[in-house]
Image (cartoon, coloured by chain):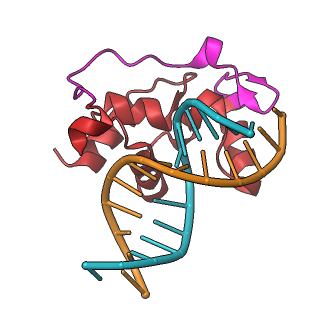
Chain colours: A red, B cyan, C orange
Amino acid sequence: MPSHSSIAATIRRIPRGKVSTYGAVARAAGYPRGARLVARVLHEAFDLPWQRVLGAGGQIKLQGESAAEQRFRLQAEGVTFRGRRVDMKRHEFHFAKTGKKKARTRRERR
DNA sequence: TCCGTGACGCGAT
DNA sequence: CATCGCGCCACGG
């Protein structure tokens, strides 16, 4: 399965009112170090709940007007914030464990 | 093929 | 809490 479609499918699993992070989505999709791939998919595929994907710790990684819109859309679905970050304690979505690849150590990959 | 770039992540300072 | 550096990965020039 092409990485982008499995990543897109993973993002689509995040329910309304819940959020996740680039890294968590990548891991759930089977790409332990594919956080940047997730970002790429979000940037190019429009038919996704893009506002539900945040940076580590619940940070909005967009800049300017886009960041404002993301925050607005999240609050519109009931997501609450703590300062500049989303209250992950209450809104982080935990993906059901699915055949994710076992992460290899850097030495194994060498 | 080499190099820069980016909606990233994390540890060190 | 703000920055920096470095690792990671796919793309494009």
Q: Main secondary structure of the magenta part?
A: loop
- Which residue is at 37% across, 40% downward? A33
Residue furthest out toward the left: A1
**Going by the image, does A54 lie left or right of A8?**
right
Residue furthest out toward the top: A90
- Which residue is at 73% across, 21% downward? A80
x, y percent for residue A62 = 66, 50
Front residue of A76/A5: it is A5
- Is residue A36 at least partly visible in the picture? yes
**Going by the image, does A87 lie left or right of A105?**
right
x, y percent for residue A45 = 41, 54
Could you say which quadrant of the image residue A95 lies in?
Answer: top left
Could you say which quadrant of the image residue B8 lies in?
Answer: top right
Span shown in magenta: A75-103
- Which residue is at 67% across, 21% downward? A78
Residue A51 colored magenta?
no
Front residue of A8/A27: it is A27
